[in-house]
Amino acid sequence: MAYLLIVDDDADFASAMDAVLRSEGYETGIETDCEKTIDRIRERRPDAVILDVMFPENDKAGFQLARSIRRMFGELPLLLVTAVKQSFLLGFSSRDLHPAWLPAAGFVEKPVDFSLLCKMVSDILARAKGIAQQSLRSQGDG
Amino acid sequence: MSSETADTVWTAYDLPLQGRPGLESADSSTPAESDELILLRNQTWFCSLRWLAIAALAALGLLGWVTTVLSPIPGIHLDPGWPVLVASVLLLLNVTHLIMVRKISQSARRAVFARRGLWLQIVLDLVVLTAVVHYLGSLYTFAPFMYLFHIVLACIFLPYAQSLWVMLAGMGMYVICLALESTGLIMARSVLAGVLMPDRRVISLAVLAWQFGSVAFVSLTVWYLASRLSNALRQRDEELSGINRRLVAATEERAGHMLQTTHQLKSPFAAIQANTQLLLRGYFGSLPDTAVGVIEQIATRCEMLSRGITAMLQLANLRSHAQNPPPPVTVDLSALIGSNMAALRPQAARRGIVFEQDLSPAAVQVVHDHAVMIIDNILSNAVNYSRDGQRVWVSCRAKPDGGAVVVVRDTGIGILPEKLPRIFDDYFRTTEAAAHNRSSTGLGLAIVRQAALAGRILVHVESAPAHGTVFSLDFPSSPGKPERPDK
């Protein structure tokens, strides 16, 4: 059973996502404090992180956290959830959302269509599993 | 602008490819230049003036050769040697300056070079000009008034006090010229030598003083007027720059507030919408039909509000200068339209509306998000303002010279001719449109307008009330320099 960590300062939204994902058979955890996320991941490494990109005190905290997670936890899949997703001008620079710079497996825009969310989570986990198996095979070949 | 087919009157409207009058940005899109760069640029401009002076001197040399060798003019003696010599000196100065500018413009010594170089050029130019005055005739000719060129230029480009120094330096050199000539240290010259070339030693000091006084008086007057005028213009320019800086800062602040406000508004709606989904999908058991109806109403209103907020954000984004927009990328419009139609089909199908498509691959250079916003809004409008069971035609064609044309046609409610020019205004909704589609934000075409301006996309609309609307989008092969969006 895959374990998903939901990181969102909006507890209501996070618990709604939690309910849906649990009903899909995933094990879930909720973290509403951006700064405690790294410790939560260290405590128990999730199979994927669903991360809100904007936090009250710093509207780029989610992006910064995403980069930190990539730096510290390698290929841990990240699914970004955002109320504001425009890859231009206001809010985020294009660099913030550029795939070469931002290590996200995908974006979901709020309000979230839960069918889409479940599909994206499923795809991301399948992709991560495929990468892991490929990596194991190549190690075996080596 | 109007064309008539059968008994239907169609009215056409082209979206102007510039911002609304009175709403143009006061911002300069280029970063503020440093003082040194401005100085260097001005010096380079002086160099281009010097090329003109070199050409004039060369022409004078030629004239001197003609009037001396080929066809002498009585009373006029123009030695062809000195103009060529002076032109050569100016040429050397110009070439040296341009080489130095190229070498130093990127270096840390740029500031020093710019300031020292400016004064060195001024002094050298005045020396060369004094030589020209000497050769043309420091008395009884127009030559001494050529100092006015330098004085006016100094008034335009330099502050009050510095332009005064230039004027004084010019007058000082003229006095030196007169003194050297009248004391016999250098031989006086004049193009009018054959007519009046008295021995300077017999010219009284009063005549010299009168001559100098006349030139100095005119120079001082011109300096006073030009520097006053220039100073007033400079002050006005600084005021405008200050206002511009405040405008840019206010725009950036507004953009930041808009982001925060959007987030603050959209997040609670997202939470409400998420929880309504939980209830409607039965995650917490089945609900009575009346409760489902109420929750559906809540979900619909949340969706409308959320869409409205997204539209406001998109518009604010397009109008914001806070950050640079992403660069244009190659987008196949037919693929983009195809995926957009696929997303709209369920909504259209609920009302029996069918898309008919004729899409050919058409790659254009465009900001991807802008293209998505334009296509999404135009296609959504075609669906929203069609009547149940109608068709929407969509075509996309590459143009032979690059770029593409997209045409979206519906047979829906149409737009009244007098309202057509206003449909791209923020929050403008015709009464007929508002009655037909209550969930419209009134911002869709305002977003299209801004994105089209940014990408230099021509938007042509033709509409006939009760018969439908045709939107034609003419995408250039590359957007070039974007229009400044409205504030």
Image (cartoon, coloured by chain):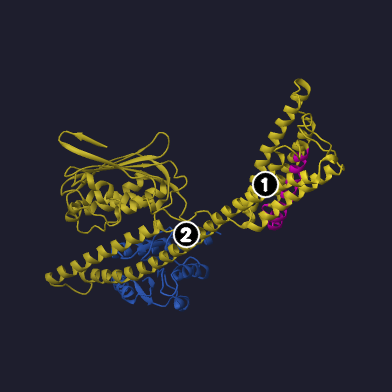
* Rendered position, B436 above or below A28: above
Work out which residue is located at the far top of the displayed protein and give it: B70
**Marks 1 and 2, how far apart at CA:** 43 Å
Asked whether, in this view, residue A88 is left or right of residue B208, the answer is left
Q: Which type of secondary structure does the marked residue at label 1 adopt?
A: helix
Q: Which quadrant, please, contains the N terminus of chain B? A: top left
Q: Which residues are magenta?
A: B105-134
Q: Position of residue B63 (x, y in %)?
A: 72, 27
Labels 1 and 2: the sequence-earlier one: 1
Q: Chain for mark 1?
A: B
Q: Residue B323, which numbered label?
A: 2
Q: Which type of secondary structure does the marked residue at label 2 adopt?
A: loop
Tell me the shade of chain B. yellow
The residue pinned by badge 1 equals B150
At 15% from the left and 68% from the top, the residue drawn is B293
Magenta segment includes A53: no
Q: Amino acid at mark 1?
A: His
Q: Position of residue B162 (x, y in %)?
A: 67, 56
* Rendered position, A3 above or below B193: below
Q: Write down which chain is painted blue.
A: A
Q: Which quadrant, please, contains the C terminus of chain B? A: bottom left
Magenta segment includes B113: yes
Q: Position of residue B430 (x, y in %)?
A: 21, 52
Work out which residue is located at the far right of the displayed protein and give it: B185
Dividing the picture into quadrants, the one containing residue A82 is bottom left
Q: Residues within 10 Å of mark 1 (few under 14, many from 20)?
A: many
Closer-to-camera residue (B216/A80): B216
Q: Amino acid at mark 2?
A: Gln
Asked whether, in this view, residue B342 is left or right of residue A30, the answer is left
Q: Nearer the viewer, mark 1 or mark 2?
A: 1
